[in-house]
Each structure stands twice: as structure tokens, then as C-alpha cells.
Amino acid sequence: MFSNRCSHRGAMIARTLRGNTDRHVCLYHRWCYSSAGELTGLPFRKGLKGEGGMPEDFDMQAVSPQRLRVANCHGMLFGTFSARAEPIEAYLGEFGTGMIRRFFSRPIRILGYSRQRIAGNWKLYAENLRDTYHASLLHEFFVTYGVDRATQKGGVKMDARHRHNMNHAYAASDSQEDAKAAYAETAARLDRMRLRDPKLLKFHNEFPDGMNLAAPTFFPNALLIQINNTLGTRQIRPKGPGEHEVFQTLFAYVDDDEAMIRHRLLSANLVGPAGLVSMEDGEAIEVVQKATRSAPDACAVVEMGGRGEVRDLAHRVTETPIRGFWSYWAELMGVEPEGAIR
Amino acid sequence: MKVAPETREALTALMADYAMAIDEDRLEDWIELFAADCDYRIVTRENVEQGLPNVLMWCDNRDMLRDRVESYRHVNEYNPHYDRHVLGPLRFTGESDGVWSFELSYGLFQTSLEGESRLFSVGRYRVEAALSNDAAALKRVLVIADTGLVPSLLATPI
């Protein structure tokens, strides 16, 4: 894997989104690259009739595009520009590799992609994924129709360095009475509102652990997501300081029958840019971006779940993993304060 | 495809009602333009061209449309905005047992409460609509959005 930037004058080399080829040619001056990213040739290198051309000592190897280190973890590919980054298994920890193995336990088939452009810094999305506190409050669909409530059994898990995290919950592990007591303001709605066609909320348990919600999130910008029977990956792609794209890939398993594929596609109504339990994230992030920009020195209050040690919890009334994220970010950026908790 | 002027007029009026119902925030009226066994889908051109079935929104009957709208009205949070559709002419592609197939282009603009407008989505509809006497009902609306990169979020139908 190599960066899509011609060594010559910096043009994009590949201009289509996907495809297969054994060589890549820049359109501008036709510099050629192998699929491994080595510069293999360029027009008029020796000049024409003894005139022009590249200097005698021009070294094609020395100007090849920047390469990425790529690692394959149970079929999920990770890349880094860092020469110092740990091997992928060590980086993700048993927590991360175990969850990837869970999602890719069977061969998959891609159902398709979705893209969402959110006018906010990418770290706001990374924070959002570590804030289990918001899930059942902002995404009221969860609570109203009983897809996911803080009263269900679940919690947050992190790796040892607290840079990755996973919000998770177990299906049907609370009662309607528990939920009504916890969500007093919406309790009336729990009785009143019913889906006329509840099929998109059906959940077929397909993993030994029985979780119906699992969102293992890997620092800095990748996650796996399961909400009932929708399965996918998301990539957070920064597009400048005030904007990012959320690129989602939904998948099924190769051995799914037609009814299961249909069920997964209908359940896709829950996730993505129009998702009944995800559309709010776009709005929440944009209103945070708008208001925080006007107060660059102001602080946020991130104390839900307690101060001090960053640790796993068997409940979800917490935003502690946000502190884990910033702790690792500060370490990487060299701005970790003295006495910082890791 | 040659189509009687009355047919073209009736189905053009149906699509005008469709767009105006959304743009005037009368989503409950919009639902009534559909048959009970309708199918409404929003997909993106990027997926269609690769033969991938992924949907941004899919209601495979009118009850699911009602659920969507009820959730929008009472449950979901989204960016407050005005919608404005601009529709192209109908291009008829077939007819069978009084169900007409046609397609048309759309542009959908969104305007914030402060009056700032942006292009939200552009693409085409593929429609199947039943027409008998004066009554028309949408059987199938497939929205194929060229705009696969959804700005902010997609709460109201296209």
C-alpha cells in the first residue's frame, strides 16, 4: 500500500474509487508505478536526441511514493505511516483481536457503503463512540422501542492503554418496569408508542456471547458495529479541522439465506446517515462544533462515571473511555500534562 | 414511449403532490400518496453501479412509512430545515395492468432556519404508479441519489 500521490508533481495517481490493475500511471506526465508502489519508468528519462531528460544520477527507487505498513488481522486491514507502531496484535490487544475474530468468524459478503459528511472535527466523532452515556438519551429510538437502554446488562471495555473501547449490551436483559423507572420523562411514550411494523427490530442471536449491541472502536479512526443484525465497519476520515466523513461498509455472511439478507437490509434503517438510531450523531457533533468554536479556552466536564482511574465498567452510565482517548492522544502528540492518568 | 396526455398529466400531478407534501412538511399527506403494499427505498448511485443492495432507507409497506414519519415527529433529533424539491419531466418506460413505470430527475435543496440554502441531494426517481379513473397510487418509489455523500444527516424523505 502506498500513498496516492505522484512523486513528480504531487498529482493523484489513481482517480477511480476501486478496481484492479498491476500498474498505475499518473495522467499528468505518465510516470509509472508498480502495484507495490515502486516508480518503474517515466517518459523522456534519457531526453530526446541527446537533449533534456533527467539527471544522470536520478534514482527511481529513491523517489517512490510513501509506503504504508499494512497488517491483516483476521481479514481486517490496518495501515500506518509510523515505523515505530507496535505489531497489530499488540496494538489492538486481546480485546481488539478477539472482537475482530468474532465479527469475521465466517466469510463475509459486502452489502454496500454509505457516506456522511459531518461539519465537525473528527475527534468529536471519536469521543461520541466512547460516550455510552449519550446512547440511550440522544438516540431516543433506542429507548422508546426497547432496542437498547442503559437498564440492559452491558458496559464498556477498553484495552490496557485505554485507547480502544467497546460499548456493548445484551439483548432483552432488562424489564419494561426497570426502563420506565430510569427514563421517567419518556416513560409515557414507552407504553404509547409501538411500531406498526416491528420487523426491523427483530433480533436473531448469531454470536455465542449473546450481545445485540457491540461497537469495538479502535484508536484513532476505525470501528466495527453491530446493532441487532446489522453488521458493519466505519472509518472516520478527517477532511480538514472542521469536517469529517463517516464511511460505513455493511456486510452479511456468505452463508446467509435470502431471508437473512433481507432482514439485514431492513435493519440497515437503524444505522447510517438516515439511521433511526444514528442520525442524531451528525446533529450533535455539528452543534458541538458550532458552539465550542466560539469559546476555544472553555473546558468540557467529563466526569460521568467518576474521576481518577480509567477502567472497564459493567454499566454504561459513563463517559470514562473519552478520558482514555484523550490520554492516549495527548501522549502521542507530546502534550501529556504532568501526573496524567493513563 | 408514447403516453396519452391525460396519463402524463395525472402522474405529473401525482409527483408534484409528492414533492410539495414533503416541502410543506405534510409528511402524513405524503404517506397517503402510497398504496398499502408500496415499496420506498433510498439508495445511492455508488452502490447501484456496483450491483450492491445497500439502502439508506427502506420501507417495504405503508405501515413502515408511517413508523418512519412518527419516529421523525416524536422520537428522532435532526437538523431543523426546510426542504425544496425541483423535479424534471417524467420519462415513461412501461405499463402493465394499469401500473405505469417512469423515471424523473430531482434536485433537493435544504434551507436552514436562518435562510442559508445548500444543495442537499440530486438524483432520480424510478417510480411505479397505479392509475385508475382519477385515482393514482404509488406502488414503488426507488430514489437513486447521485449524492452519496450525505451532508450532515438524512431525516426527511427524498
Image: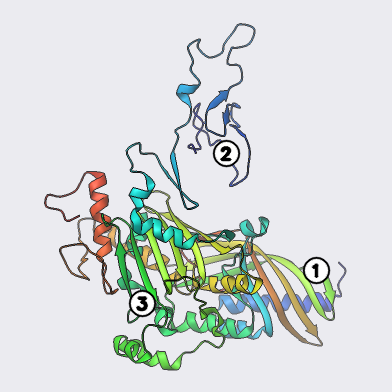
Disc 3 from disc 2: Cα separation: 42 Å
- Which is in the foreground here, disc 3 or disc 1? 3
* Residue toward you, B56 or B155: B56
Badge 2 density bin: few <14, some 14–19, many ≥20, Cα 10 Å: some
- Amino acid tagged 1: Phe
Residue B104 appears in the figure: yes
Q: Residue A310: image x %, image y %? A: 21, 62
Q: Are marks 3 and 1 on the same chain?
A: no
Q: Which mark is residue A115?
A: none
Residue at label 1? B92
- Amino acid tagged 2: Ala
Residue B158 appears in the figure: no
Q: Which mark is residue A14?
A: 2
For the point 37% across and 49% down, the residue is A89
Q: Earlier in the sequence, mark 3 or mark 2?
A: 2
Q: In which quarter of the view is residue B21 placed?
A: bottom right
Residue A6 higher or lower than A302, as above or below = above
Q: Residue A104: image x %, image y %? A: 50, 59
Residue at label 3? A136
Q: In which quarter of the view is residue B25 placed?
A: bottom right
* Residue A288 appears left or right of A41: left
Q: In which quarter of the view is residue B107 placed?
A: bottom right
Question: Dot 3 falls on which chain?
Answer: A
Disc 2 from disc 1: Cα separation: 38 Å
Disc 3 from disc 1: Cα separation: 46 Å
- Amino acid tagged 3: Ser
Question: Dot 1 falls on which chain?
Answer: B
Residue A62 higher or lower than A305, as above or below = above
